[in-house]
Amino acid sequence: MKDLSGQHKYIKMAKKRTKRNPKRWIQGVKIKKGALHRQLGIPTTVDIPVSLLRKIKATPTGRTISNPTKKGKRRIAVTTLLKRRVVFALNVR
């Protein structure tokens, strides 16, 4: 006779995952407000220029870019976390 106790646990986990509504995924995201502003050195009262966001998105990870605008840091190191935040900012915009 087989032991089904481990499979029962797996089935419960699978049911929990399917209950999520994929249309409302954004409500479950934990957003750190102002994190991109702090990372770029731009005050939260000032909007981040879209040209800067697009330049960061186009740059490969590990490179350093010069800021094309007059706001924030002059040189910005592009990291994976920074790219994730920029892509999110562009999509939510």
Image (cartoon, rainbow, N blue to C red):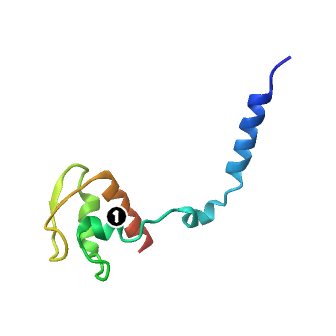
Looking at this view, name the residue that lies furthest to the top. 1
Q: Nearer the viewer, residue 6 or 50?
A: 6
* Mark 1: secondary structure: helix
Residue 64 horizontal side relative to residue 51, left or right = left
Looking at this view, name the residue that lies furthest to the right. 1
Q: How many numbered marks appear?
A: 1
Label 1 CA crowd tier, 10 Å (few <14, some 14–19, many 20+):
many
Q: Nearer the viewer, residue 45 or 58?
A: 45
**Residue drawn at point x = 78 percent, y = 29 percent:** 5
Q: Quadrant of the N terminus?
A: top right
Residue 64 horizontal side relative to residue 44, left or right = left
**Residue drawn at point x = 26 percent, y = 50 percent:** 61
| Place of residue 16 in the rendered image (x, y in percent of width and height, measured from the top left) | 71, 49
| Place of residue 79 in the rendered image (x, y in percent of width and height, measured from the top left) | 27, 53
| Place of residue 82 in the rendered image (x, y in percent of width and height, measured from the top left) | 31, 58
**Residue drawn at point x = 31 percent, y = 83 percent:** 45
Name the quadrant containing residue 37: bottom left
Would residue 21 be visible to someone looking at this image? yes
| Place of residue 21 in the rendered image (x, y in percent of width and height, measured from the top left) | 66, 60
- Judge whether 76 appears above or below 70 on screen: above
Q: Nearer the viewer, residue 41 or 25?
A: 41
- Judge whether 82 appears above or below 93 on screen: above
- Judge whether 42 appears above or below 11 on screen: below
Kind of residue at disc 1: Val
Name the quadrant containing residue 2: top right
Would residue 54 be visible to someone looking at this image? no
Q: Nearer the viewer, residue 63 or 33?
A: 33
Q: Which residue is mark 1?
A: 86
Q: Quadrant of the C terminus?
A: bottom left
**Residue drawn at point x = 17 percent, y = 75 percent:** 69
